[in-house]
Amino acid sequence: MGNPIVFLILAGVAIVAAIMMVTSRNAVYSALWLVLNFSAIAIFYLLLNAPFIAMVQITVYAGAIMVLFLFVIMLLGAEQLRGVTAAIGGERWQQVLAVFSGLLLLGTMGILVFQGMGDGGDTAVTINSSPAALGVRLFEVYTFPFELTGILLLAAMIGVAIFSFKKKKKEES
Amino acid sequence: MTTSQIALWGLVVGFIITLIMVTGFAYTTLFERKLLARLQVRFGPNRVGYIPIPSRKGKERKLLGGFMQPAADAVKLFMKEDMTPAKVDRVVYFIAPMMAVFTAIAILAVIPWAGKLPGLPAQYEYFAIAPGINVGVLYVLAITSLGVYGIVLAGWASNNKYAVLGGIRATAQMISYELAMGLTILVPIMLADSMDMGQIVAGQKGMWYIFLQPIAAIVFWIVIMAELQRAPFDMSEAEQELSAGFSVEYGSMRFGMFFMAEYMKMIIFSAIFAVFFLGGYRGPFVDQFPVLGLVYTTLKIIFGLFLMIWIRASLPRLRYDQLMAFGWKRLLPISVINFIVVGVAIVLVEEGVFDSLIRSIQQAIPFLG
């Protein structure tokens, strides 16, 4: 797991960024904190000897997806929460459900962490995580799930195209 | 070498290369101004700093007129009042130029500058800040995609409609062209069978990829120009529509930092183009004298810069919809088809389908071997 000091600093950055992301009043700030969080997680992957995943994390999440988020926020002018603050709290049952599912997640995580303690701590070091090895695994062992993911993304893309073309036709007629 | 020694090497070499880059940036501005002026039949900056040489026939003669111009520009930018417009988002306004410069400098880490120089640590195959990274190309892509933030945040934080529009235009353009960029970068990766920048250079021994793959090289070059916001793709700085675009509210050295990021990226992407398609530091006799690698890299970078400035001086700007249509309807399909063709061709060559053809070509042109 690399240097424990590096790990602790990064963990601090990631947690603070995540909390700030949720609590920021300004949506652009939220997006920026999320970028910081993603970058910290990318460095976690580097510490775990997974450089490929780390770079993909930065390119796809910090680079592409968050830029699109920023884009939408800026185009809609939705930086500030105006007049919707009351609604943000949500219904009573939603609050209860949120707290309950949060605790459930935390509990599951705790059990997994305690079960995992003492064994398999160094497995990351022994795995060959070079891009070539990753590609071989992806295309030989996990071919089917990989192709399924591709079809899922294609479906999403076609859906977007259908929606935008429908709108265009309506505007013309 | 231990981890701390590797880190120390990275710090020292990185510091030196960054300093060279900053000087290089200053002189790239002068190079651009001089060359643009020459292409437009002007003189360009020729007053600040010269080497006086003895006069002949009563005529005063000067050498290298204007070579101190970048220093004068820097002094001017630093002496200007650094003012922050009212109602800007202060934090983001300060961070945006830093993001721009950070992404420009960070790419430097993986670029190979020369081969196995004498005095290089034994396990380093080539001279770079961080050699031997097996995801080097992905690192370039990752940092490039972060480069968008500097521009989009500058536009948003300025609290100015023109700046926001400029920033959004620039971002849309960069995102659109990044797709074609990723696909064309795959071609040298497939040819070299590696994502390590040094391996890609080593794979071009005897045959530069620009000759194997001219289409990919041309598409990559166009994409670079778009990614850098250079003319004819300088949509974000349209004086007529948007005044100065995303940087309109920035002054003094804060504006200088955007300027710096742009010109440093010009140098860096010239270097990357050289690495992918022009054989990087390779050239005649580079195996016998590794120091020549530095010379070849520099020459190839200067060639790239020359090409960029030449194109800027020659071509009119695109309209914004033409730019988007060009990126999505021309470059992207071309690079997808090219990528598939290259993939199939590599497999066929490995299977030995073209063996006799290659042998006959090799016999015809012996020096290609």
Image: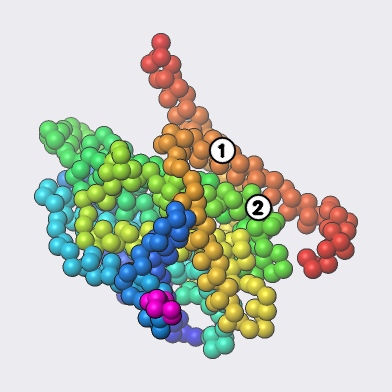
> Label 2 neighbourhood size at 10 Å, few (<14), some (14-19), many (20+)?
few
* Residue A97 located within the stretch drawn in magenta: no
Location of residue A72 (image quadrant): top left
> Label 1 neighbourhood size at 10 Å, few (<14), some (14-19), many (20+)?
few
Identify the residue at horizontal 31%, vertical 54% (top origin).
Answer: B150
Which amino acid does the dot numbered 2 rest on?
Pro
In this orientation, which residue lies closer to the viewer: B222 or B39? B39
The chain letter under disc 1 is B
- Circles 2 and 1, Cβ within 8 Å, touching? The answer is no
The residue wearing badge 1 is: B330
Closer to the N terminus: mark 2 or mark 1? 2
Identify the residue at horizontal 59%, vertical 61% (top origin).
Answer: B276
SS at badge 1: helix
In this orientation, which residue lies closer to the viewer: A72 or B223? B223
The residue wearing badge 2 is: B214
B7 up-or-down from B331: above or below? below
* Residue B304: image location, x then y, percent: 52, 61
The chain letter under disc 2 is B
Q: Is residue A92 left or right of residue A34?
A: left
The magenta segment:
B56-63
SS at badge 2: helix
Cα distance in 3D space between marks 2 and 1: 16 Å
**Residue B78 in sight from this viewpoint:** yes
Q: Quick one: quadrant of the C terminus of chain A? A: top left
**Secondary structure character of the magenta stretch overall:** strand
In this orientation, which residue lies closer to the viewer: B242 or B357? B242
